[in-house]
Image (cartoon, rainbow, N blue to C red):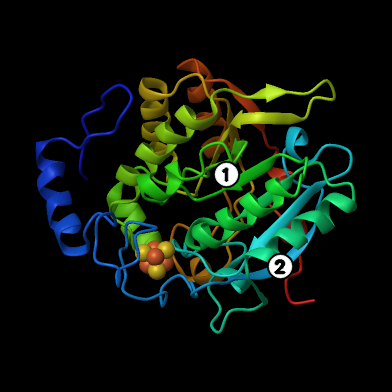
Amino acid sequence: MLLFFQEKKRFRPSLGASFFYSIICNRKGLGEDMPDAICAICPRACQSGAFCGKRGGVAVVAKAMIHMWEEPCVSGGNGSGTVFFAGCNLRCVFCQNHEISQTRPLIGVAHDADRLAALFWDLQSQNAENINLVTPDHVLPITREAIVIARRQGIALPFIWNSNAYVNQKPLQSLASLVDIFLPDLKYCDPVLSLRYAQAADYFFHAGNALCTMRDLVGLPQYGGNGMMRRGMMIRHLVLPGCRKDSMRLLDWLRANIPDVPLSLMAQYTPMHLAKQMKPLNRRLTGFEYESVLEYAMKIGLTVAYQQGRGAATPTYTPDFLR
Ligand code: SF4
């Protein structure tokens, strides 16, 4: 396993890790300042959207609905106006949304920016508390354009970027003053794990930098009188079976770099998709695994804004995308 040098504010790999990343990054490029034919949105730097399902000029929406099962400061009393995009640039083996993130051809309806903006208005008309964009990174340009249109038209709701954080710096920074709330799901620390489970050995390198940028863009959470989050950032982390040490390393990094951002620590892991056949992901999380990570987060002084009971580990809370 590679060890990383931790530095305030921006993630930098150690010398050994630098060599490791020079191989990865020289092979793929950093996804920025690349020829037009190569996509610059995320670190994969592909020449097509074959991995993530990205299409030119449109975003495929698998489902748009009022969603009640986010954190209370996100769902509130009326529910979060959630847009589930089809496709994903990370494609974790245990993805609970795998039917829409990994199925090809994509399941859903193609939306250009105008149509997407109209969808935001439709959710606002259903009294949604916010517009919650789920897995939006691979469709960032078109989604950004839709937010610009909706803002110009006077939409009032906060926009939430509900992301896996595997995104390049320039596209992320282009969301400044458009996105109100970042809700990144920080998944892995160890490159061996992120390679095995998401084909992305460089995940933490890029996600760490993305989290620092998100913090710069929106700052700490600000809440309205009704307890709803109006602006800011909250980090989610799902503890995985057999990976509690990795969770702790990830928490150490948060403590050293962005200790003031609240955490939503999740226990809802359920074996799904390819993970059903993969040890140790083919079992539920134990109480010990979750509790030890939770205790560690508190011990090192992180703010755990939300924690989950093991009763959350059920597919019940996942929308039926095929209906
Ligand atoms: S967003 Fe999709 S097409 Fe673009 S680099 Fe990432 S995986 Fe490749």
Q: Amino acid at mark 1?
A: Thr
Position of residue 178 in the picture relative to residue 40 (left or right): right
Q: Amino acid at mark 2?
A: Arg
Residue 113: x %, y % from top left = 63, 64
Chain-order first, disc 2 or disc 1: 2
Above or below 256: residue 316: below
At a point 42% along the width and 34% down the height, the residue shown is 213
Pick the quarter of the image with the N terminus.
top left
Which quarter of the picture shows residue 23? bottom left
Return the residue nearer the eye: 242 or 41: 41
Disc 2 is placed on an element classified as helix
**Crowd rating for badge 2 (residues with CA inside 10 Å; few <14, some 14–19, many 20+):** some
Position of residue 229 in the picture relative to residue 181 (left or right): right
Above or below 26: residue 37: below
Residue 270: x %, y % from top left = 61, 57
Asked whether disc 2 touches disc 1, contact meaning CB atoms under 8 Å apart, the reply is: no
Numbered badge on residue 115: 2
At a point 46% along the width and 70% down the height, the residue shown is 52
Disc 1 is placed on an element classified as loop
Residue 22: x %, y % from top left = 13, 51
Residue 91: x %, y % from top left = 47, 65
Which quarter of the picture shows residue 37? bottom left
Report the residue that reaches farthest toward the bottom: 105
Pick the quarter of the image with the C terminus.
bottom right
* Of the two numbered discs 2 and 1 in the rendering, the one whose residue sits closer to the viewer: 2
Which residue position holds label 1?
Answer: 286
Return the residue nearer the eye: 272 or 33: 33
Report the residue that reaches farthest toward the front: 152
Real-space CA distance between mark 2 and mark 1, rounded to the nearest whole angstrom? 44 Å
Return the residue nearer the eye: 264 or 229: 229
Above or below 176: residue 227: above
